[in-house]
């Protein structure tokens, strides 16, 4: 792993996100034809986007790479792009929340909610490839020039440490939510 840039794992994560977006896209045509959603599909998509794409992937970008970039004197273009990316992450969170809300209404039988689900899913399908391309081809590589090899190595190590804590965080939250539901019943 020595001499791997901290953007390496981020770009590998992009490939998995692209695969999930392809799954969502292929699933949408079936949903449109049948008017029904395969049980567990939306929950799986939302969990993937919230936990993997946002908490894990965007978390490393924002909490490690962008935080370190903010300590540097970077070009106005790179600074503008970084803030655009942060805004895009926020947009993805809001769109995922709207998808979740629409799915809740769908399971409650509310008319019109299927169209909202399809719309929000399409929004994510359009968003992620463009967002990933911006990061992979126009941002990640050029901003590495702001860092020394030692700084790159430290960011890479922080990324690995970040990943190690995530599984524990996720399942601690699962247990805490289960405990709350248990107390309510």
Image: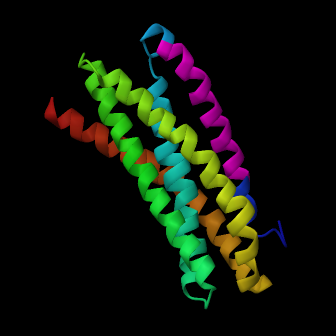
Quarter where residue 46 is shown: top left
Could you say where residue 22 lies in the image, as x and y percent from the top left? 65, 32
Residue located 47% across and 33% down the image: 121
Is residue 3 visible to the viewer in this orientation of the structure? yes
Above or below, 163 against 70 in this view is above
The range drawn in magenta is 12-32
Quarter where residue 119 is shown: top left
Residue at the extreme bottom of the image, as rendered:
73
Residue at the extreme top of the image, as rendered:
34
Residue located 23% across and 35% down the image: 181
- What type of secondary structure mainly makes up the magenta span? helix
Q: Is residue 154 left or right of residue 121?
A: right
Residue located 71% across and 45% down the image: 15
Residue at the extreme left of the image, as rendered:
184
Could you say where residue 131 lies in the image, as x and y percent from the top left? 60, 54
Residue located 59% across and 84% down the image: 76
Could you say where residue 143 lies in the image, as x and y percent from the top left? 70, 77
| Residue 66 falls within the magenta-colored stretch | no
Above or below, 102 against 55 in this view is above
Q: Quadrant of the C terminus?
A: top left
**Front residue (pair 180, 137):** 137
Could you say where residue 80 lies in the image, as x and y percent from the top left? 54, 75
**Front residue (pair 174, 83):** 83
Q: Quadrant of the N terminus?
A: bottom right
**Front residue (pair 163, 47):** 47
| Residue 17 falls within the magenta-colored stretch | yes
Q: How is the structure coloured here?
A: rainbow
Q: Is residue 133 left or right of residue 122?
A: right
Quarter where residue 18 is shown: top right
Q: Is residue 14 left or right of residue 120?
A: right
């Amino acid at each position: 792993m020595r001499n791997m840039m901290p953007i390496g794992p981020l770009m590998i994560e992009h490939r998995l996100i692209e695969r999930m977006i392809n799954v969502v896209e292929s699933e949408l045509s079936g949903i449109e034809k049948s008017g029904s959603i395969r049980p567990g599909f939306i929950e799986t998509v939302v969990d993937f986007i919230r936990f993997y794409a946002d908490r894990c992937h965007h978390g490393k970008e924002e909490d490690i790479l962008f935080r370190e970039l903010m300590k540097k004197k970077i070009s106005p273009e790179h600074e503008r792009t970084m803030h655009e990316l942060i805004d895009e992450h926020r947009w993805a969170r809001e769109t995922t929340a709207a998808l979740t809300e629409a799915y809740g209404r769908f399971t409650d039988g509310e008319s019109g909610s299927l169209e909202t689900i399809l719309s929000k899913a399409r929004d994510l399908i359009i968003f992620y490839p463009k967002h990933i391309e911006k990061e992979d081809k126009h941002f990640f590589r050029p901003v590495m020039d702001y860092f020394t090899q030692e700084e790159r190595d430290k960011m890479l190590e922080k990324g690995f440490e970040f990943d190690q804590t995530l599984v524990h965080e996720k399942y601690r939250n699962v247990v805490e939510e289960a405990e709350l539901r248990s107390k309510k019943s």
